[in-house]
Amino acid sequence: MDIVRSLVKLLPYILVLVALVILLKQTILKKGNFFDVDQILEKYIGIFKNKSAKMFMFKIYILLIIISGGITYIKIIDKDLIDTITLIVSVLTTAFFGFVPILEGLKLKTENAKKEKNDTNSLLMFEILLNTVILILCFVYMFILPEDLYSITCEKELIFRILSFIIYYFVFILLIHVLMILKRVRLLILTDNE
């Protein structure tokens, strides 16, 4: 009987998780033209064509997994932190949308500069997609977060730790890419002024 009660208490969390998985599956499928997630991901992966760039990003992603795991072990995301993350991600999304017309306005002459511009645009689209995923995760987290984080049961703590890890990981990926975008945009602007 206790197992049934535990499952009934976890049912809303399971339903949200199933709905998110179905939504993710529908956005990645190539059948519809509503979402271009698959194209955004293909273009993002295409940025790292040579082996050294792929290896560098692989190492960065592994390090971010380790950092996210450590921070999740230290602190589960609480209400104040989720509010801060949501605010920062919203501001960055606006900034990324602002970069798109700046890139389109650049009159680049060389093929290499034009390729850099396309790669930077692909990176911006990936960042906007990542921001959207982070915001969705943050909203889900806010809805299931209890008033007192210390009153959660062991089953729920595992869910909050997993969600915290995923949110931390995506935020760190976002921050690493912000540095890449700033570098690329600065170089493109310098190239345009020559």
Image (cartoon, grey):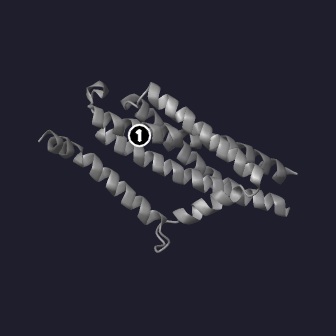
Q: Residue at x 88, y 51 (%)?
A: 194
The answer to whether residue 193 is left or right of residue 88 is: right
Q: Nearer the viewer, residue 96 or 155?
A: 155
**Position of residue 189 measured from the top left corner of the image (x, y, whole percent):** 78, 49
CA neighbours of label 1 inside 10 A, class few (<14), some (14 to 19), many (20+) = some
Q: Residue at x 37, y 44 (%)?
A: 139
The answer to whether residue 159 is left or right of residue 126 is: left
The answer to whether residue 116 is left or right of residue 1 is: right
**Quarter of image, res 173:** top right
Q: Residue at x 41, y 35 (%)?
A: 82
Where disc 1 sits, the SS reads helix
Q: Residue at x 42, y 65 (%)?
A: 26
Q: Which residue is mark 1?
A: 162
**Position of residue 45 measured from the top left corner of the image (x, y, whole percent):** 65, 58
Q: Residue furthest left?
A: 1
Report whether residue 181 is seen: no
